Amino acid sequence: MKPHSGTLIIDISGGQKAEAYEGVYQCTARNKHGTAVSNNIVIRQSRSPLWSKEKIDPFIVQEGASLVLPCRPPAGLPPPIIFWMDMSFQRIPQSRRVSQALNGDLYFSNVILDDSRNDYICYARFPHTQTIQQKQPITVRVINSKSSCQRRPMFLVPSETGSTKMVLRGQVLELECIAEGLPTPEISWSKVSGEFPSKRTTFHNFHKTLRITDVSEADAGEYRCTAKNRLASVHHIIGVTVKAAPYWITAPRNLVLAPSETGVLTCRAGGNPKPTITWSMNGIPIENSPKDPSRKVEDDTIIFTDVRTGSSAVYQCNASNEYGYLLSNAFVNVLAEPPRVLTPSDKVYQVIMNKPALLDCASFGSPIPRITWFKDTRSSVLEGDSYVFHQNGTLEIHVAQTTNSGKYTCVATNSLGISENHVYLEVKEPTRILRQPEYWVVQRNRDVVFECKVKHDPSLTPTMIWLKDNGELPDDERFVVDSDSLTIIDVTENDEGTYTCIMNTTLDQDSASASLTVVEATPTPAIIYEQPDAPTDLELTDQRDRSVQLTWIPGDEHNSPIKKFLIQYEDALHQPGIWHNLTEVPGIKTTAHLKLSPYVQYTFRVLALNNVGYSQPSYPSRSYKTKAAAPDENPSEVEAMGTHHDNLVISWKPLTGLQSNGPGLQYKVMWKQMDVENQWASVTVANVSKFVVSGTPTFVPYEVKVQALNDYGSGPEPKVVVGYSGEDFPLAAPNNVQVFVQNSTLAEIHWMPVPPNSVRGRLKGYRVYYMKQRDQHKHNGHHTEQQVLNFSANKTHGKLPGLHPYSSYKLNVRVFNNRGEGPPSPTLQFETPEGVPGPPAFLKVTNPNLDSLTLEWGPPNEHNGKLTGYTLKYQPVNNTNELGPLEELALAANETSVTLPNLKYSTRYKFYFNAKTLIGPGPSITEEAITVMDEAMASRQVDIATQGWFIGLMCAIALLILVLLIVCFIKRNKGGKYPVKEKEDAHADPESQPMKDDDVTFGEYSDSEDHKPLKGSRTPSNGTVKRDESDDSLVDYGEGGDGQFNEDGSFIGQYSGKKERDTAEGHESSEAPSPVNAMNSFV
């Protein structure tokens, strides 16, 4: 035994005899969970025995007679390979006249003088021992016969008048017929009750051996071999029966069960005769194994119910008949295991928009975990037609959009625990070529640029590849590749071809192509390109049943080379006047070998294509009609489906007149019930595209095929299509229906699936009908419209959303198929708990007073429970919409109005009002209202505005302001004259002179201190007078300049109305114009 392995090594290199190890071996593997066994392994020693010594007399025959040279090789293991050679080790030539039979004998249908020789040697090669044994040489002498009589054919093999052959399913069937006669007969084969399977049938040994591989039950029947020469023909019938060693229909598979669960092991095998099924447990026949009340054996099935921990075992199923056996192990593992998610965590999936996305959630657990998917948060389960939930936990999004991007959570749950995993989906923009390369026709030595502008997802890294004629670009520096273009410098004739830009990302790609044509430079300033002229002189040659050769002469190209020729045909027999495209040939050719269909009256014409476009069609060729033949194909789109519970409609797409290959087109429609009927039922119809089979069982599988026939024979063996007969309404309703109320608006419903045989069709799903009967706070019933929810066929539970709180509901569940619904389950009633109420029906303010307001309201239209009261909140709102302090008031459920006292007069209030139940408060409604204004205050406000004394006071103030403005105006325009010193003294440096504020008067100079500046001012060295910070300075009323003195002592500046300034004057003031100046300007 090989260490750490189950391999058994038998070493006979030490001189042991191999015969000692011959026998039947079987491997057994066991551990604490059970025992598994292998198939039987037979070991036999290969043998190559010697030919027995014998004396072989010469064969003396008349010329033209038949002859058989026996080989009879020794039996070897495995059987030897037989061949005939001469003394020079050259093979004996074989032909229709001389051939080797399957048993190795050499047959002569008739002998000739050249067959005389003394070295016919039969060799036997034993492949396993790599040895060759030879028989003693055989001598043949052919006696010359002056008058060789011709003979009718007679069979040498088979020698009996009738023969049979048995072959096993899946093996190779070889039938042999060898005939003698003069002249040499020709052998042909046919099947009496059908046709040969074309893809599995071959002929060998000069048509004397018929071989069919991979034999099936359909190959059984009678086969006729016919031997024919010019004198007569004879035939021989060989009856073939097909038996079958056991083969699997359903092999048992490993089973993982949780404690108390139910499971089934199925072992179904086919064969002829029908196999016998036996069971073993851990290698021991099950009838001899310890009894287990949870296990029940029923022929080819073992049913496990309420399994217990510790009852794990390996079960063997043996299916056997007289031709062989099958053995399969299945491990039944009783395991209690919390769920585990096997998919790597935080895996990122990237897909292109509008493509499907598959998010994996592989899990393990016992019981088998239930997989639930969430997106972003676990607030709601993913549901809807846009999602497909596979049995293995995979979530499929049919058409991914950018909104599908995000975090997805898969949760695996069973009775022992829960496990979750997060994955991420990124939906990317597709890669698209926005500007494709253009077709170019350029002169030699010019430059050409192919543009290829691409849009792609910014998060993906693109790669641009350029190809020439689907190959790499030439290694030439003239080819310059940029990010979005290809430039070819100084093009030559070798650069002609098709250029393709391919933009690749890690997820997708896009491509576009354009062609480059290089033409010679011509001295003419402009070249006129036109469509080519039509081809001429169409001729048909080499006319055959299925082909013809067409030749023509091209027309003028008009400066643009012809790229290709388009050949069209008209079928005057089936579609006169309509031209069809047949084929295209390159522009350099003027001959085309055309493949034709039988039974068509052809007329051909040719069109030429250059860069400008197609030419006009040529004149039609002469007519050519092909011979009729059997159809080459069968109808397509064969379908089988029932429209009623007791029929099967077989439909197909009929052949066209061109496909019919001959007159008398018909269809042979064949059908049989799958795995029940062995013989095909058939009917032949014409001019229809469907046939209805009546009286079928309900929803059972049928095998159907449709074959085309015409007056010249049948089409090829048609493909088998499986369909189902019609469906009927389901018989059973789901049972054990239960409702689990989750909250006030959501309930979950569970049911047991119906038995599959009661569906009587393809199970489409389950349909839940539910209807609200009444609100619980109302005594009288109020039925609402019935609602319906559909659930897929693999569902046994579902959710009922959007329920009304505090209401009574009734529901039932029905199963449905393509025909319709089954009976309803017993009606089930349930009630939803309380919820929060809806908003009050209305809120309005009545009887507004100086310091109080009265509010009235209506109860909510939707109570959603028992009302426990109302909550009123309010707060004042001032003129700037600022909110004041919030007051709250609780009100009883039976109240419908309230008066709020002690409010502020003439104040706007905002109210918030809602109802509440034991669950909590509902949504609020709002309202605003204003208290009444105080009458005394209102009257005072009106009187003060209408009193005469108040009006007079306002007029006096206005008049006084006007007088002051006029006085200021007059003073400004007049201005006094003041004595001054010399001009140079007026501009002395003020820093060197002392200043006394109280010795200075406004607008005057002292005789002794005339150098002092004005009071409250500073005189800079440049002679300008600048304002100080006093608000009384007249400079404040100017237009921005500083006041100054003139040579005559006058105070000038803004009051003078002049704007003449030296360049040395000070900066302008930024003060705004005064009302006085504005008045001056006005005057």
Image (tube, rainbow, N blue to C red):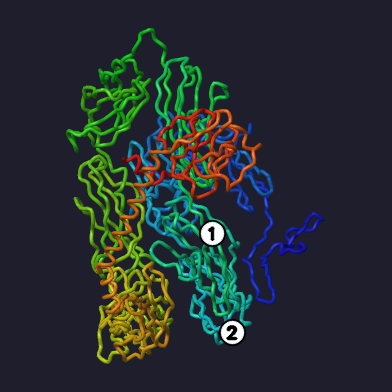
Q: Is residue 131 visible?
A: yes
Q: Quadrant of residue 543?
A: top left
Vertical position of residue 26 compared to residue 615: above or below:
below
Residue 120 lies, in percent from the top left, at 58, 37
Disc 2 marks which amino acid? Answer: Arg
Element type at mark 1: strand
Q: Residues within 10 Å of mark 1 (few under 14, many from 20)?
A: some
Q: Could you tell me which residue is drawn at 54 percent across and 71 percent down?
A: 412
Vertical position of residue 783 compared to residue 624: above or below:
below
Q: Quadrant of residue 792?
A: bottom left
Q: Is residue 737 left or right of residue 604?
A: right
Task: In the rendered structure, find residue 1068 and report the number of the disc placed on it.
Answer: none
Q: Could you tell me which residue is drawn at 23 percent across and 49 percent down?
A: 666
Residue at label 1? 424
**Quarter the N terminus occupies:** bottom right
**Residue lying farthest right?**
14
How far apart in space, not on screen, are marks 1 and 2 (Cα)? 40 Å
Nearest to the observer: residue 649 or residue 785: 785
> Which label sits in the foreground, 1 or 2?
1
Vertical position of residue 1060 compared to residue 361: above or below:
above
Q: Could you tell me which residue is drawn at 31 percent across and 15 percent down?
A: 528
**Quarter the C terminus occupies:** top left
Residue at label 2? 308
Residue 348 lies, in percent from the top left, at 56, 56
Residue 324 lies, in percent from the top left, at 54, 65
